[in-house]
Image (tube, rainbow, N blue to C red):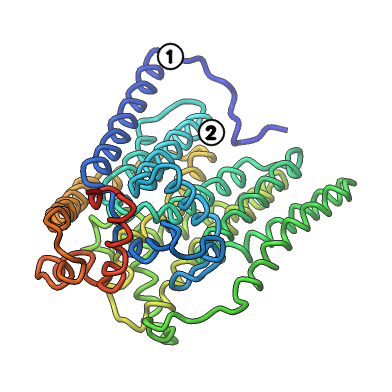
Amino acid sequence: MSQTYTPPAQATSASNETLRWALLGVWAVLSLGALGFVTAIGTNAPYADEWEFVPVLLGAEPQHSWLWEQHNEHRLPLPRAIYLGLFKLTRDFRAGMVLQVVTLSALALGLMRLSARLRGNPHWSDVFFPVSLLHVGHWENFVMGYQICFVFFAVLVSGLVVLALQITRENAFRFGVWAGVLLAMLALSGGSGLAAVPPVSVWLVFIAIVVWREGAKGKAAILLLLAVLPLVYLGVYFVGYERPVHHKEPSSDPLAILRVGSEVLAMSVGIGLSGVWWAVFAGMLVLGIATVSLLVRRWKEPAERLSVIGLIAVALGVVGVAVAIGVGRGAWGGGMGLWSRYSLLVWPLLAAGYLVWVKFGRKWVPIVLCCVAALAFPTNMLTGMAEGAMIKSEYSALEADVRLGISAEQIVEKEEFKRSHQASQKERVIRGIPLLRAAGIGIFRK
């Protein structure tokens, strides 16, 4: 039985080899560019929400209980454990920034190689992956190491897409186990990951049924356990959960939820096209309908059913994230979904759409997605560079004040601070600066 995702091997022509090296060159340049951005803009100092964690990072507050504590709507035990470990190892807030870039670079390279393998040869449109993942329009994530939680979401969801694309009855148990592991890690990575738990758990149950019918009842039981555990965690997550006091009540207005959720989905191509987010959303809607229609047609082929269910389940999980943000931010009004940090939460939808059409031998959708990513790239870069320059200037001013011995209380009262990206962190900065000075961290070192 032939599988559409493993086309016959083709002889490697000189043109294919040249193209492969050209794609690698673009990937390398963009990876180095993103790394250069975080090393040039990044400062060994807390950014935004990171000021809240200074006492924990420096041992002034308990660390183990912090792994489970809420941060806004999120519990992030896995990213927090990695973030804490990185800081202990490096004593540098930039470690998380670098890890983000390295992780996204590896993801872009891996998906480029997968696309070439699915197709049987590389194509210039595969540059979509580094162009859409490694631009500095992701500045809001890149300048705060703690945002590894969003990067992990993008990587883990993309991993589920890769598994769903290639699953068959023959490898169902092995791929199902990997999907269960990725889903568990996703659930441990914050509230965003919880949205994927119900649909992907249903997919795991379907895989278990297929394995059961093949006579491997023990293996089916393992898959059922992997499907149930994230659902149990979902219940545990809300034990003692408290709505953030500084947030408005969740919205019950369908139009407000739709508006913000649509904005979030439009961020998949980056902040650079936020001015025409409605057009981007419309394009995503068309892409989604066309891709689901293609998958439904493939349902007629028994060999494709595990794959079809898996891809739709993962897509539902990502759309669920956008809906959840719409509910949580809808009461704040329009524009609350147009934040660059949301880009990595919904980008896997674009990657899934691209790879599905590649798998089934269609070239025009990948080409269009690549062209859209290329169109957004300049404005993404300009936005990120402008924001990065402002942040660098703010931290240069903060460093100068620290070296002059100005107290934290005086720093937060200065007009420069009140206009900065840290303005909302006043109380946390007042507590954090003396601790950072005492510990000799980064720009606070005497």
Q: What residue appears at the point 44 percent right and 83 percent down from the top-left corner?
A: 250
- Kindly identify the residue that appears in the image at 60 percent across and 56 percent down: 296
Front residue of 259 and 98:
98
In three-dimensional space, the C-alpha distance between marks 2 and 1, rounded to whole angstroms, equals: 17 Å
Residue 251 image offset from top left, x and y in percent: 42, 84
For label 1, the SS is loop
Task: Judge from the rendering whether residue 235 lies leftward or rightward of residue 101; answer left or right.
Answer: right
- Give the labeled residue for mark 1: 13
Residue type, numbered disc 1? Ser
Nearer to the camera, 287 or 276: 276
For disc 2, the neighbor class at 10 Å (few under 14, some 14 to 19, many from 20) is many
Q: Residue at x 45, y 42 (%)?
A: 89
Looking at the rendering, which quadrant does residue 228 occupy? bottom right
Front residue of 49/397: it is 397
Locate residue 321 relative to residue 410 in the image: left or right: right
Identified at 28% across, 62% down, the residue is 434
Relative to 71, does residue 376 appear above or below in the rendering?
A: above
Q: Name the residue under label 2.
A: 118
